């Protein structure tokens, strides 16, 4: 498993692998033989390689839901619930601010300066963004709009929803972890019967 070592470490640390974040690793994980080899190694660790329904992103899940796994998933689920509303609001803000007919998807590019300029020109969007930045998920302490927006994008990058290809160029690419987020929302809505709204005022996010 030496040839898979670096990739296994990334997955075990909680990474989500897609074509946007790492096209070579994604292609590697799409190979059935590689999947079998990795799952064979992961079995004693009670992990397995999984993907979303569209096979656009790969990550690890538990093989068996024992007590330890259930405790970890419970904590993870609680954290996910806390982040869902701000993430959904951000998705809708991007859609409205950039004048898109549909929600953003993996591979879409967002130019930070364009987003800032359009938000500055719209009082309603500016107010909503300031409220979003103050949410504990982003926890902005600044009153300056551009600083708030930069913090939001930086946090989304840290959480794997955005990729910044060049540190000196202010544009971001949406990763397929967005697809995972949408699947989580569907699960919560359909299986847990929680009131998560998935139909914003324009086009549905899901």
Image (cartoon, rainbow, N blue to C red):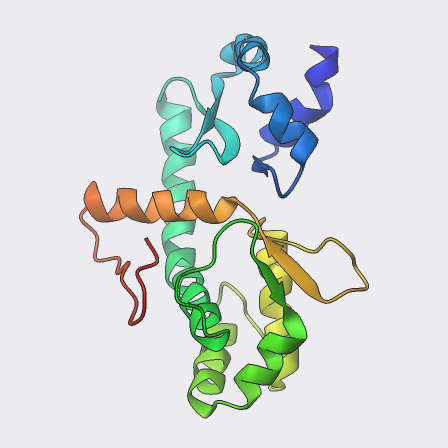
Residue occupying the point 41% across, 60% down: 103
Relative side of 200 to 87, left or right: left
**Residue at the spot x=55%, y=23% of the render?**
30
Near-viewer residue (43 or 176)? 176
Q: Nearer the viewer, residue 198 or 194?
A: 198
| 134 relative to 63, above or below | below
Furthest-left residue in view? Answer: 193
Q: Is residue 43 at all visible to an observer of this figure?
A: yes
In the image, residue 3 above or below residue 14 = above
Outermost front residue: 101
Q: Position of residue 26 (x, y in %)?
A: 61, 30
Q: Quadrant of the N terminus?
A: top right
Residue 80: image location, x then y, percent:
41, 49
Please say whether residue 148 is visible from this viewpoint: no
The reply, left or right, for residue 140 in relation to residue 89 is right
Residue 86: x %, y % from top left? 42, 65
- For the point 62% across and 77% down, the residue is 114
Where's residue 133, x and y in %?
Answer: 52, 74
Task: Kindly identify the residue that appears in the image at 64 percent across and 62 percent down.
Answer: 154
Q: Quadrant of residue 65?
A: top left
User: Could you say which is closer to the camera, residue 37 or residue 12?
Assistant: 37
């Amino acid at each position: 498993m030496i040839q898979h070592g670096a990739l296994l470490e990334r997955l075990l640390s909680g990474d989500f692998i897609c074509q946007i974040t790492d096209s070579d690793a994604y292609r590697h994980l799409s190979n059935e033989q590689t999947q079998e080899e990795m799952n064979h190694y992961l079995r004693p660790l009670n992990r397995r390689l999984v993907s979303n329904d569209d096979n656009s992103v790969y990550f690890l899940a538990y093989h068996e839901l024992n007590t330890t796994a259930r405790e970890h998933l419970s904590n993870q689920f609680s954290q996910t619930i806390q982040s869902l509303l701000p993430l959904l609001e951000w998705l809708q803000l991007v859609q409205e601010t950039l004048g898109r007919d549909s929600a953003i998807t993996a591979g879409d590019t967002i130019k930070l300066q364009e987003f800032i300029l359009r938000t500055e020109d719209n009082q309603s969007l500016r107010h909503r963004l300031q409220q979003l930045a103050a949410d504990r998920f982003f926890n902005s302490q600044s009153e300056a709009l551009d600083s708030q927006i930069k913090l939001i994008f930086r946090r989304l990058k840290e959480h794997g929803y955005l990729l910044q290809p060049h540190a000196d160029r202010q544009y971001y690419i949406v990763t397929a972890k967005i697809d995972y987020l949408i699947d989580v929302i569907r699960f919560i809505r359909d299986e847990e019967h929680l009131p998560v709204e998935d139909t914003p005022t324009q086009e549905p996010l899901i």
